[in-house]
Image (cartoon, grey):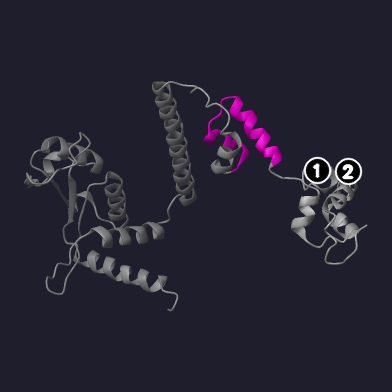
Amino acid sequence: MTSTTPGKYADFEGLRQQAIALRREGLSLRQIRDRLHVDNNDILHRLVKGEPPPEWTKRPNAKDDLRDRARELRKEGMTYDQIQVELGCSKSSISLWVRDLPKPEPRYTDEEQRTLMNEGLARLRSAQDAERQAAKRAARDEIGRLSDRELFIAGVALYWAEGAKDKTYRRSEQLQFINSDPNVIKLYLRWLELLGVSRERMRFRVSIHESANVAEAEQFWADLAGVDASTFQRATLKRHNPRTTRKNVTEAYRGCLVIYVTKGAELYRRMEGAWYGIVLGADPAT
């Protein structure tokens, strides 16, 4: 045992033999320090240099199992991305753990990888589309059959969004509606029926690009409205601007259907009044 005098480290070799003996008995550095009264950490580490610490002093490393598993997976031929998905750890850690191992041969050729990727994208898009359609069906089924009041309100909102409106600078109290969506036209016609408007009071006209098949479009809208195409007014043809690129050039393009109601001033006023009633009814402050 050494003294606590300034020269207590003079017999370094003798002190080292004591430290090594204590280390081999299973003492920790703290215990050796207290036993030999060595307060200098640098001297303490030099005294036990080369002697491994006892097992009980080693702290468990939570990443040891991950590292071993990562090396196993790398040897099986997995990429860094695949190992990351499997273990949930960072690629930087994986790289440190397995960089001494040979890079695995690619499992697939470039063409096979592209095929697999495209197949995966196709499955993803199919699943996404199925999810979209399911959401739409669920929302559709929640609506159920509309009452006359619900249909009236829906029709008023639809007309105010898409129909011609009276302006202070241009008095035009008449019902005139234009749209290209067949379902929108069906709903509008059903709304007019609710208001007691017969087909005889309706005037139909197609608005379409001049390059389209006008006769075919008129027949399409006539069938949808349940009227004779011969009763249609002369179509409004839109001239094509060569500086623009039209996208509505498919066979499904039928232009827009314009529906005008004769003697519709009173109905227009009722519609406009109902619209402002909807606005007031939806305002929580009223």
Instruction: Label 1, secondary structure: give it.
Output: loop
Give the residue type that dot 2 points to. Answer: Arg
CA distance for labels 1 and 2:
8 Å
Q: In this picture, is 201 found above or below 102?
A: below
- Tag on residue 24? 2
- Which residue occupies the foreground of this view, 150 or 245? 245
Q: Residue at x 23, y 52 (%)?
A: 198
The stretch of residues the image draws in magenta is 64-89
Residue assigned mark 1 = 51
Describe residue 254's horizontal placement relative to residue 2 as left or right: left
User: What quarter of the picture does the C terminus occupy?
Assistant: bottom left
Q: Position of residue 240 (x, y in %)?
A: 7, 44
Which mark is first along the chain, 2 or 1? Answer: 2
What secondary structure is the stretch in magenta mostly built from? helix
Q: Position of residue 54 (x, y in %)?
A: 84, 44
Task: Identify the secondary structure beneath mark 2.
Answer: helix
133 in magenta: no
Taking the magenta stretch, the answer to whether it contains residue 77 is: yes
Apparent side of residue 264 relative to residue 274 in the rendered image (left or right): left
Task: Confirm or deny contact between disc 1 and disc 2 (CB under 8 A).
Answer: yes
